[in-house]
Image (cartoon, helix red, strand yellow):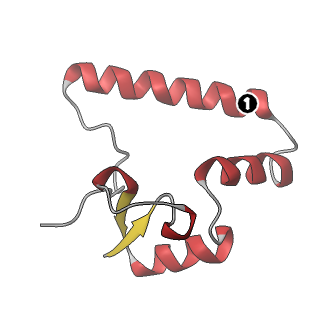
Amino acid sequence: MTKHHIICKCKGGRDYPSNIAYITREVHTKYHQLFFTLLPDQIVTYLVNHFWNGQWNWVRKALNEYDKEVLRREKKGESTHNEGESTHQPE
């Protein structure tokens, strides 16, 4: 596993736990091959404009549904991360 800064250090990202995800080296390499040092909102904008035909309404709806699911899980005390997703340092 390797440390990935969600907001990259070159754009002011810090070593705060909330800004770090631990992912495989292969995934980390592919991420930066695809997105270089783009910020998360810049990545979504790029995807919407270049791959999803500018369908912002669809993206907003999907994010809204995701937020509802996260809140539902939090209320039940369940994990809010997708299965297979790792955002914390392995022990």
Task: Determine whether, in the image, residue 50 is placed left or right of residue 13.
Answer: right
Q: Say which residue appears at 66% left-offset and 67% top-offset.
A: 35
- Amino acid carrying label 1: it is Trp
Asked if residue 54 is positioned above or below residue 31 in the image, the reply reads above
Pointer 1 local density, CA inside 10 Å: few below 14, some 14–19, many at least 20? few
Asked if residue 23 is positioned above or below residue 88 in the image, the reply reads below
Count of residue discs: 1
Q: Nearer the viewer, residue 13 or 20?
A: 13
- On-image quarter of the C terminus: bottom left
Task: Determine whether, in the image, residue 39 is placed left or right of residue 28.
Answer: right
- Percent position (x, y) of residue 57? 76, 26
Q: Quadrant of residue 1?
A: bottom left
Q: Quadrant of residue 33?
A: bottom right
Mark 1 highlights which residue? 58
Q: Say which residue appears at 46% left-offset and 60% top-offset.
A: 13
Asked if residue 54 is positioned above or below residue 5 in the image, the reply reads above
- Percent position (x, y) of residue 11? 57, 63
- Percent position (x, y) of residue 81? 34, 44
Task: Determine whether, in the image, residue 55 is placed left or right of residue 75.
Answer: right
Q: Residue furthest front?
A: 12
- Percent position (x, y) of residue 36? 65, 72
Q: Say which residue appears at 34% left-offset and 20% top-offset.
A: 72
Q: Nearer the viewer, residue 24 or 2?
A: 2
Task: Determine whether, in the image, residue 46 is placed left or right of residue 83.
Answer: right
Q: Residue furthest left?
A: 91
Q: Residue furthest right?
A: 53
* Mark 1: secondary structure: helix
